Amino acid sequence: MARVEKARMPRWMRRRVMCGPALRRVEEVLAEEGLATVCVGARCPNLGECYCAGTATFMILGDRCTRDCRFCAVPPGEGRPPDPGEPEAVARAASRLGLEHVVVTSVTRDDLEGGGAGQFASTVEAVREALPGATVEVLIPDFLGDPAAVDKVIKAGPDVFNHNLETVRRLYPRVRPQAEYGRSLAVLSRGREAGLLTKSGFMVGLGESSEEIDELMVDLFAAGCRLLTVGQYLRPTAGRAQVSRYYRPGEFETLREKALRMGFEAVAAGPYVRSSYFAKEMLDSVYEKRTAGIRKRYSQEEMARR
């Protein structure tokens, strides 16, 4: 977390995570396999907690992004050619860490044909082969809206198809100048139409209004998104967008309850919530709800037959 934020950070945003061998084990595996994580690249405030729990979110296609979003710590620049051995390296690392839910994201690579969608598909397939009992979640860029690229990831069959909207429509030119609000919604719609469980997330504290948040959630639900994450924006470096305000824990709970009333199947909202934060638990909760629903319908049908 950037030092520039600490002087203004409210007390409910301050916490300490104590850890030892588990964190070092994750770092060792990642280093030995030559892998990057969004935890490090994006300066995620949950890095210590997640590494201590023996998990991490893999970031493929390098550690340089062809875009320069004003909220992100990943450095912009020219990326290297995709590593053909990277999918197997991710699978090995996931296996060595004993992951039951594997989350794979990437930098945005607008310089590559299909935006690197083929690397996503290969990584999903490699993880499936190495860990047939694990679930796989992808957090993809928009691939410049290329439907063939999106379909390539869809055909790999991830359990969760995630693409973050990040912020409200009005703030896109300032916060995500190389992205398009409608294009991101179209990516989610394509995943939903293919029958995948879709997920998205956004940040608060960038200057949005409550009405704009409502519009964003309505748009996400209409696009077929059923899993939602909402977190506090934290300025990662001095050169990024400033925090407009810090939302209180109660405000996050209000947003969570509103999203659930709208029909979202699972919602995580809180100051430190991020896309892959407790991702397995979120997916498990959806499976549990759906299974409970099936049992209830079956019971009702049995009662009706009697």
Image (cartoon, helix red, strand yellow):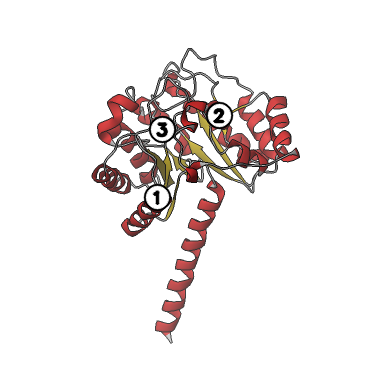
Q: Is 200 placed left or right of 209 in the picture?
A: right
Q: Nearer the viewer, residue 85 or 272?
A: 272
For the view shown, which residue lies furthest in the bottom direction?
Answer: 306
Looking at the picture, does residue 245 appear above or below residue 254? above
> Which disc number belongs to residue 150?
3
Q: Of discs 1 and 2, which sits in the foreground? A: 1
Where is residue 28 drawn, in percent x and y?
73, 30
Quickly name the residue at label 1.
Answer: 252
Q: Of discs 3 and 2, which sits in the foreground? A: 2
For the view shown, which residue lies furthest in the front direction?
Answer: 7
Q: Nearer the viewer, residue 201 or 237?
A: 237
Quickly name the residue at label 2.
Answer: 59
Where is residue 283 drawn, in percent x and y?
51, 52
Q: Which residue shows up at 40% across the image and 37% down it?
A: 164
Looking at the picture, does residue 247 appear above or below residue 4? below
Where is residue 80 drawn, in percent x and y?
54, 14
What crowding class fits label 1: few (fewer than 14 Cα within 10 Å), some (14-19), or many (20 or more)?
many
Q: Secondary structure at mark 1?
A: helix
What crowding class fits label 3: few (fewer than 14 Cα within 10 Å), some (14-19), or many (20 or more)?
many
Pointer 3 or 2: first along the chain: 2
- Calculate the distance from the C-alpha at mark 3 to the C-alpha at mark 2: 18 Å
For badge 2, the amino acid type reads Met
Pointer 1 or 2: first along the chain: 2
Q: Nearer the viewer, residue 272 or 216?
A: 272
Q: Which residue shows up at 29% across the image and 33% down it?
A: 181
Q: Quadrant of the C terminus?
A: bottom left
For badge 1, the amino acid type reads Phe
- Calculate the distance from the C-alpha at mark 3 to the C-alpha at mark 1: 31 Å
